[in-house]
């Protein structure tokens, strides 16, 4: 990825909102480079600063300090006319689609072309091309209220692409859609990237979205980027608690406190959670370690999925054997993967990154 030309560069970018209740550092000293032609995910919980960060790219919000470069130009120091041109090169789609209800599908897609002063014939040809690209040719004369959510977002994409931008910003563009429709829309986003070479920035709070379309990802919390990199590396080896929570929530591979309490009732022995990753931590390693040590392991919980055709997830086991043998087994496994000791029913240990329902009061988790 490092060979890509930088397309969007944040340099100590900071955005402070002054509110009656005090200052909000919505974006706080972000340094980040998004390469030309990549699909870059920005993930974080509500209020993390994702939307504000992305609105700095097209200067919908002015920065408080720092710089945001697009194609090497600081967008926050452009003159009004230059900014208008720069914005025409950046398309945007939204969670709530933001379509004009009084205009037809074709009218919505034609709107930015009209504003840009395209003559009628050229406009009509471009609209036909765009509707074909998003598979909505037969809906050209329909009104937004007659469309499903997925169709509305496809109109949103066609409109965003109308003036041939080189950047597409997608702000929670699938959050109002069901999982199947989400896939359809993300497939189009992928085509926008691959077939048209557009650099895409995807803001989401859903790890599945990042997993499905993004090359790289930045995780935001409290206005800061707490972790970023290749999607597989970030999610297979999360360094930050926020990232670990995303992985846990999406995969549900680790027992929640409530599930762990239930497991302990059925499995009083030593419980451990073992990471499964491509490099060393593959489940084959677990099989080998079980064969090499006088320890029995029963898988009692877990989940493994893949990102970019590489496995990641975890398995939770109940172990049986002498204490010393179990200790040697865990030390051996710990050389190639992460091992989280959850203790026994009599001496329980907690998972600091567990997600999901808490254990009921009085449960031993
Ligand atoms: N115009 C504004 N005025 C004051 N505070 C704002 C403004 N816009 C955003 N904020 C605050 O900045 C912080 C970051 O908001 P932002 O919308 O960027 O987060 P987000 O990660 O996109 O969350 P969400 O997904 O809920 O939109 C929040 O605390 C929010 O309340």
Image (spheres, rainbow, N blue to C red):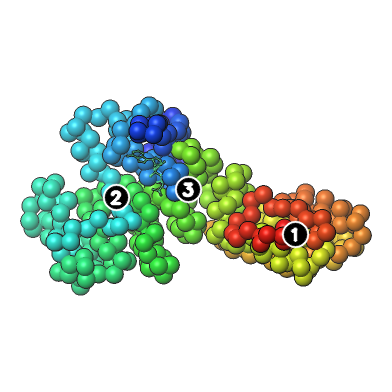
Point out the tag, 3 or 2, that comes first from the N-terminus.
3
Which numbered disc covers residue 258?
Answer: none
What whole-number distance in Å separates the C-alpha atoms at marks 1 and 3? 31 Å
Callout 3 touching callout 2 (CB < 8 Å): no
**Residue assigned mark 2:** 92
Q: Is residue 253 left or right of residue 284?
A: left
Point out the tag, 1 or 2, that comes first from the N-terminus.
2
**Residue assigned mark 3:** 44
The label nearer to you, 1 versus 3, is 1
Q: Residues within 10 Å of mark 2 (few under 14, many from 20)?
A: many
What whole-number distance in Å separates the C-alpha atoms at marks 3 and 2? 19 Å
Q: Secondary structure at mark 2?
A: strand
The label nearer to you, 3 versus 2, is 3
Q: Is mark 1 within 8 Å of ligand 1?
A: no
199 lies above or below 182: above
Depth check: give the residue in front, 82 or 175.
175
Q: Is mark 3 within 8 Å of ligand 1?
A: yes
Q: Quadrant of ligand 1?
A: top left
> x%, y% of residue 196?
32, 54
Callout 1 touching callout 2 (CB < 8 Å): no
> x%, y% of residue 2?
49, 40
> x%, y% of residue 102?
14, 61
């Amino acid at each position: 990825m490092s060979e890509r030309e930088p397309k969007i560069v944040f340099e100590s970018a900071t955005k402070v909102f002054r509110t009656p209740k005090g200052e909000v550092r919505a974006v706080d000293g972000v340094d980040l480079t998004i390469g030309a032609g990549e699909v870059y995910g920005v993930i974080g919980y509500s209020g993390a600063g994702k939307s504000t960060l992305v609105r700095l790219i097209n200067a919908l919000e002015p920065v408080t300090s720092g710089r945001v470069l697009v194609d090497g130009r600081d967008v926050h120091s452009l003159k009004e006319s230059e900014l208008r041109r720069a914005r025409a090169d950046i398309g945007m789609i939204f969670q709530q689609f933001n379509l004009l209800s009084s205009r037809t599908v074709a009218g919505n897609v034609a709107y930015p072309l009209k504003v840009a002063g395209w003559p009628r014939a050229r406009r009509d040809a471009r609209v036909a091309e765009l509707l074909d690209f998003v598979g909505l040719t037969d809906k050209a004369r329909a009104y937004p209220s007659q469309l499903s959510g997925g169709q509305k977002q496809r109109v949103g994409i066609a409109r965003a692409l109308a003036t041939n931008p080189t950047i597409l910003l997608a702000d929670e563009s699938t959050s109002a859609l069901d999982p199947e429709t989400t896939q359809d829309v993300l497939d189009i986003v992928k085509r926008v990237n691959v077939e048209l070479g557009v650099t895409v920035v995807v803001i989401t709070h859903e790890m599945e979205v990042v997993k499905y379309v993004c090359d790289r990802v930045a995780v935001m919390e409290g206005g800061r980027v707490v972790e970023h990199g290749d999607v597989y590396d970030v999610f297979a080896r999360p360094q930050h608690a926020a990232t670990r929570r995303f992985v846990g929530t999406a995969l549900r591979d680790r027992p929640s406190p409530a599930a762990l309490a239930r497991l302990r009732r059925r499995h009083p022995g030593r419980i451990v959670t073992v990471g499964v990753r491509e490099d060393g931590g593959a489940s084959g390693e677990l099989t080998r370690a079980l064969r090499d040590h006088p320890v029995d392991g029963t898988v009692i919980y877990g989940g493994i999925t893949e990102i970019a055709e590489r496995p990641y997830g975890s398995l939770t086991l109940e172990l049986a054997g002498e204490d010393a043998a179990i200790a040697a087994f865990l030390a051996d496994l710990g050389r190639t993967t992460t091992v989280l000791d959850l203790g026994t029913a009599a001496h329980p240990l907690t998972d600091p990154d567990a997600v999901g329902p808490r254990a009921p009061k009085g449960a031993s988790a």
